[in-house]
Amino acid sequence: MHRQIRALLGAGHEITYVAPFSDCNVTPDPRIRAVDVPRAAGRRRRRALGAARAALERGVEGADLLVVHDVELLLRLPRRRPATVWDVREDPRDLAADLAADARLPAGLFRSLPALVRRIESRAERRLHLVLAEESHRERFTGSHPVVPDTTRVPRHPPLPPGHQNRVVHLGRISHARGAAELVELARGLAPHGIRLDLIGPADGGTRPLLRDAQREGLLDWYGHVPDRHALRMAEGSIAGLSFRHGSPGRDRPAPTKIIEYMARGIPVVTTPVPAAAALVGRVGCGAVVPFGDVGAAVRAVLALRDDPSGAAAMGARGRAEAALHHDWSGHAGTFVNLLEEWAGEPVTAGRELGSLEPWHAI
């Protein structure tokens, strides 16, 4: 909404946006035609996906282009549709892990999910236009597809200084693979020092009870989904922005987008040593890298930032300068709009389904 759709609106295009506005407590932008659908969550996804299919069938009437972000929706595309673009954002292993955790799948079905996602991807590549959010996605496909990096909007106004508010923040989806247990333990370690943890983002089914219990204990505040522009404003002034993603041997991928978002808002970063994240933070000098699972080291890193406000401010300034120079969405918005304008207007065709994959439908 705040990058792609905003860029399309700025170019004079009309937008119909199908999304779970009510379930995410989001008020749609008045400039778009909003179509509200239920959120697919847990094992009860059929109804939500059926509603999304019906909404897409209505929404594409008279449309020049359909853009889909969710892999599950690739199995619910309208048969008669305009030129269709799949915006590829998730690694299939991350997607499979998140879906399995949210739906609490049996181990056997979980092991089959990555292969299932790859089958869907292969079929989609033959029938749709693809735009990739990361260079590393290229290796998953046989053809050549344009890359529009998943960056952030760097605000022009000066951000609040780090430590302006006595708290640390984690932006984005929360799961065990993204350090949910470590985040709770960090909150417990920081509480005696008067520092609070804010979690801003949805959580998968397996971690929600953990977060609710920690919130009842008074260790942290978990806000759930918050619209991007509000979430980033809430994060400003924090002592540190956290990224506790677990290690994934043999994987080469960019630093998590949340790290770029922290940098854009002048917030020092505390991250685990995921290679790209550690390399970025080390090169720029915008935060600290702590070992996987070492909550004590994370507590010490946060306290060091709190106790050295001038050093933390310098880290925040270096991160913000790097984000403005290399990771500002304004440098990619035009490319994205031009791509979609090039693909729009192709004749409407009776598009084929991507297949009925029963193990996927079972959830």
Image (tube, rainbow, N blue to C red):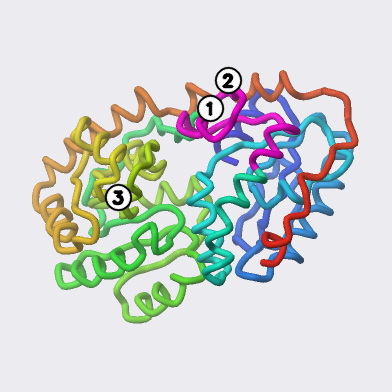
In terms of image quadrants, where is residue 41?
bottom right
| Secondary structure of the residue carrying numbered label 1 | loop
Q: Residues within 10 Å of mark 2 (few under 14, many from 20)?
A: some
Residue 6: percent from the left, percent from the top? 61, 34
The three-letter code of the residue at mark 2 reads: Thr
Q: Considering only vertical position in the picture, is 104 above or below 252?
A: below
Of the 4 image quadrants, the one containing the N terminus is top right
Q: Which residues are magenta?
A: 121-146
Residue that badge 2 annotates: 335
Mark 3 and mark 1 lie on one chain; the one further toward the N terminus is 1
Residue that badge 1 annotates: 148
The three-letter code of the residue at mark 3 reads: Gly
Q: Give the left or right position of residue 259, taking residue 81 as reference.
A: left
Q: Give the left or right position of residue 168, taking residue 313 as reference.
A: right
Eye-nearest disc, 3 or 1: 1
| Secondary structure of the residue carrying numbered label 3 | strand
